[in-house]
Amino acid sequence: MLPISLTHQFADRLPELAHPWRAEPCPSAQLVVLNESLATDLGLDSDELAAESGVDLLSGAKLPASARPVAQAYSGHQFGGFSPLLGDGRALLLGELETVQGLVDVHLKGSGATPFARGGADGRATLGPMLRELIVSEAMHALGVPTTRSLAVLTTGRPVFRHGREPGAILVRTAASHLRVGSFQYAALRGDEALLQRLADYAIERHYPELADTDQPYLGLLRSVISAQAHTVAQWMLVGFIHGVMNTDNMTISGETIDYGPCAFLDVYDPATVFSSIDSESRYAFGQQPVMAEWNLTRFAETLLPLLDDDPNRAVDLAKSALEGFAGQYEQRFMRGMYAKLGLARTPAEDCDEVRGTFSNQDAVSASWSQNLPLNSLVHDLLDLMQRRKLDFTGTFRALTAAADDELEPLRAQLATSNNANGECRTGEFDAWLERWRAQRPDASVMRRANPVVIPRNHAVEQALREANAGDTAELFALLEAVTDPFTERTDRARFAQPAPADFTRYFQTFCGT
């Protein structure tokens, strides 16, 4: 008996965006990783999933009678260029799982080519990229970043030829939904307002049900997605995450992070950092991510114009007004997170209360954020010092956490390995900043909860993937244990807290994995 039952609400409600399809048969599917913690959260039995019938289900070979698997259609701006038809070229939505938290999509990646596969692609995936998504998505969840989750990775028994012969694999992903900005672009491109409205209604039902009975539910949807994405991208920036491929088909309506293809994490703090091999113009560089999120949200707003108001000019005004809120929401969330990372007792909300009376409206407060908050200079000056001194992002904040407890040696060690732009090693500037910061009496307990010891450092991930490809998964499971418990300091995990060797970072690139 198969261990789960699935609904097919997306397929029923939006057949124009759903192409019925089946996974490619696997010669001999084998479970590599089963996320037992997630399985429990979803109300599933790990032993049943690990059994033969469970592996058959996870590979898409045998599905419950309630399932109607589909490849989803969507459009998208990819690196700024619009593609009217993209869709799941190597993925399938098996259906929705009913849980106590609500509906959860169960989705396969690497299950074979669909009608949306492009350029003769075989629709298959290799083990390394699927394990990368599992490692990074589960780390992001543990760090508190909204994200899709990874339930399992399986090998298919079929080799795939990318960079030589590699093991074929399937990732089983879960998500609040797979509705994207690109889904709305596809519906809008068809010029079918009824379809667009059904899609918007479905998005509201899945993610923002409180909007259903409001006077302007579609304007509320736009504002809610803007708010959700402002929060998510701020979280990316606080943990040093670089998505690498922020196309509109990779921005979810739920606000969850999706598609861990050419993703990476900062070592040395530099807003211009790019690791993705396909981002030749640095469109999605680390520091560009908030700007590109706003750009993507503008494309989303464009799709909703027919639903916002019958008067096109009025619809545009409403959309612009909503979009103007993104920058202020992002900055408030980012600064609130930075205050926590620096253990500052006050919050941006409290500082806003002080300055709010000076201005006539909230927009003025948001616009004045950087200029009027007295503690913000500490944040911006630190980031400037970190960039000029080429300091490790995660390591510096952990060293400051120790410094808040009067343990200065970790910070001195960080500074000793850094150089300023002239190749000199000086501590005077940092000492002056340190004195200003310590005068604020930073709270080390707050900092320990905000600054991870371990992130999925690029060199550690690459080593784990190399060994897993060769059949040894010991380092993979050790890394998974560490990144899913990122705020705990343990001596046996010390290697995962170390920055990459300079030569590694200098030449490291990430790839989309297709």
Image (tube, grey):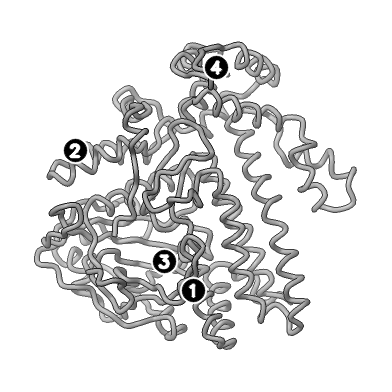
Q: Residue at x 24, y 39 (%)?
A: 464
Q: Which residue is mark 3?
A: 104
Q: Which residue is mark 4?
A: 403
Helix, strand or loop at label 3? It is: strand
**Which numbered disc, 1 or 4, marks the residue closer to the eye?**
1
Helix, strand or loop at label 1? It is: helix
Q: Residue at x 71, y 50 (%)?
A: 328
**Tag 4–tag 2 contact (CB < 8 Å):** no
Report the amino acid beneath label 2: Ala
Disc nearer the start of the sequence (1/4):
1
**Tag 3–tag 1 contact (CB < 8 Å):** no
**How crowded is the residue under tag 3: few (<14 C-alpha within 10 Å), some, or many (20+)?**
many
Disc nearer the start of the sequence (3/2):
3
Locate residue 424, reporting x and y percent: 51, 13
Q: Which residue is mark 2?
A: 474
Residue 26 has which mark? none
Q: Relative to 410, does residue 296 appear above or below in the rendering?
A: below
Disc nearer the start of the sequence (4/3):
3
Answer left or right for 170 relative to 203: left
Q: CA distance from mark 2 to mark 1?
A: 39 Å
